[in-house]
């Protein structure tokens, strides 16, 4: 049975450990379509199980926090990431220190 792109994205996002983040593009590439970063964003937006699939751990390629529909939006996303130990530089995640190192 074939696994859809969406299912692959959810599986990968679910594997991001606490204290780490992945970028939308990183998940797109790992799921098999490096050009589908925006599609990953849409998939994360429609995540119906944030306890199992930690969509707050997915950030822009420059470490910026984008779209988060739970709580108070981006401020809640930042609070969750800080509680998990994600390192920030100003308003952006320091990807050198906090990016998940899973590769294709």
Image (tube, rainbow, N blue to C red):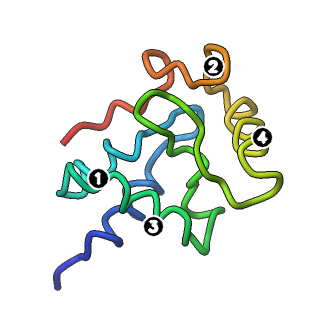
Left or right placement of residue 64 versus residue 72 in this view: left
Q: Which residue is mark 2?
A: 88
Q: Residues within 10 Å of mark 2 (few under 14, many from 20)?
A: some
Q: Which residue is mark 1?
A: 28
Residue 4 location in percent, x, y? 25, 76
- Looking at the image, do the residues carrying marks 4 and 1 touch, with CB atoms under 8 Å apart? no
Disc with the residue nearer the chain's start (4 vs 1): 1
Mark-to-mark CA distance, 2 and 4:
13 Å
Residue at left offset 58%, top offset 64%: 52
Q: Residues within 10 Å of mark 1 (few under 14, many from 20)?
A: many
Element assignment for label 1: helix
Residue at left offset 24%, top offset 37%: 103
- Looking at the image, do the residues carrying marks 2 and 1 touch, with CB atoms under 8 Å apart? no
Task: Please give the count of numbered marks on the rendered protein.
Answer: 4
Disc with the residue nearer the chain's start (3 vs 2): 3
Residue at left offset 51%, top offset 62%: 44
Residue 33 location in percent, x, y? 19, 56
Q: Which residue is mark 4?
A: 75
Element assignment for label 3: helix
For the residues carrying marks 2 and 4, which lies nearer the camera in this image?
4
Q: Residues within 10 Å of mark 3 (few under 14, many from 20)?
A: some
Disc with the residue nearer the chain's start (2 vs 4): 4
Q: Which residue is mark 3?
A: 43
Say if 58 sits above or below 103 in the image: below
């Amino acid at each position: 049975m074939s696994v859809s792109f969406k299912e692959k994205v959810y599986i990968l996002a679910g594997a991001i450990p606490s204290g780490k983040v992945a970028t939308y593009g990183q998940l797109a590439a790992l799921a098999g379509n490096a050009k589908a970063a925006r599609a990953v964003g849409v998939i994360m937006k429609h995540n119906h199980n944030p306890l199992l699939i930690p969509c707050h751990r997915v950030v822009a390629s420059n470490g910026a926090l984008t779209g988060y529909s739970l709580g108070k939006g981006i401020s809640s996303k930042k609070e969750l990431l800080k509680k998990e130990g994600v390192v920030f530089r100003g308003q952006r995640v320091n990807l050198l220190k906090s990016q998940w190192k899973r590769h294709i």
